[in-house]
Each structure stands twice: as structure tokens, then as C-alpha cells.
Image (spheres, grey):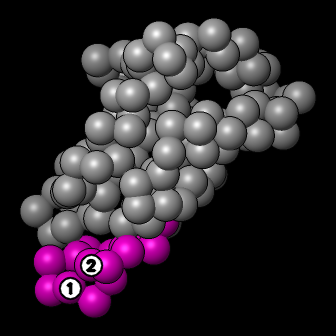
Amino acid sequence: MNLKLKALKKSLWVYHVSAGSCNNCDIEILDLLTPRFDVERFGIVLVGSPRHADVLLCTGIVNKKCLERVKEVYEQTPKPCVVVAVGACACSGGIFRDGYQMAGPLNKIIPVDVYIPGCPPKPESIIAGIVKFLKELK
């Protein structure tokens, strides 16, 4: 197993990418940082730069305006990078699936490792998805 993947078992540094969302998923992600849900007990910490991130937490549809930005952020992350699609929009396009502004689902633009569906997904679902991924690493 790759040394970096072994390190992911204990500490996940997460960079949040909002790719044109309605902000409902973003609010649920902010909820994760409160003492009620406390994701830091799993070693999950938000970082301010994709260059320091192990995980990209992506929300929203990828619209045509932010298509290049999403690709650029993914290129800036050190590899291997885990990409988590949070919410129905990031997973499949949600209600915007056939919209003129949609550039495509996230998995057509960058490789996605974990899908957490819901509109918006509850903080418990986001934690469960990430913990399930961590268990698969072990």
C-alpha cells in the first residue's frame, strides 16, 4: 500500500470545493465542524490550500464557468488525492442534470472515489461516508 494512503488512515486534510452549488451542502459541511458533530475526532481538518490537501470535498454541479477551476484545483492537489462528491448535484447533477449551464457530472471531469448522495446530505451521512472510506483503507 502506498505510504500516503497509510497516512490517510489517521489524518485527513480536506479542501472544500464549491463547484456552483446552492450552498445547502456547504452549510451541512460547516455543521461538521461544530462541536455537535466534531469531525476532528476522526483526524479530519479543513485546510486553506489544495496544495496541502489529501481530500477534495466537492459540492454542487460543475457548471461551465467553474469547469476549468475544478480541473485546476484537482491538478494542484498532491497525488494520491481522494475526491468526495457530496450531494445529489455533485453525484449526478440532481435537478440541474439537463440544464444548459451544466458542464457534466463531477465524475466525468475528475475521478471520484466516494459518493455521498442527498439534497443536502445530513452531517451524519457525510461522516458515515468518510468513515466507511477510512475502513476500506485499513
What residue range appears in magenta?
91-105
Placement of the N terminus among the 4 image quadrants: top right
Residue at horizontal 37%, vertical 66%? 89
Residue 56 lies, with reference to residue 41, above or below; the image says below
x and y percent of residue 124 in the render?
59, 38
Whether residue 86 appears in magenta in the rendering, the answer is: no
Verify CB contact (< 8 Å) between mark 2 and mark 1: yes
Q: Which mark is residue 7?
A: none
Q: Is residue 28 left or right of residue 27?
A: right
Q: Is residue 68 left or right of residue 65?
A: right
Which residue matches tag 1?
Answer: 99
Residue at horizontal 53%, vertical 60%? 117
Residue at horizontal 40%, vertical 55%? 120
x and y percent of residue 131 in the render?
72, 33
> Residue 138 is drawn in which quadrant?
top right
Residue 105 lies, with reference to residue 25, above or below; the image says below
Which residue matches tag 2?
Answer: 96
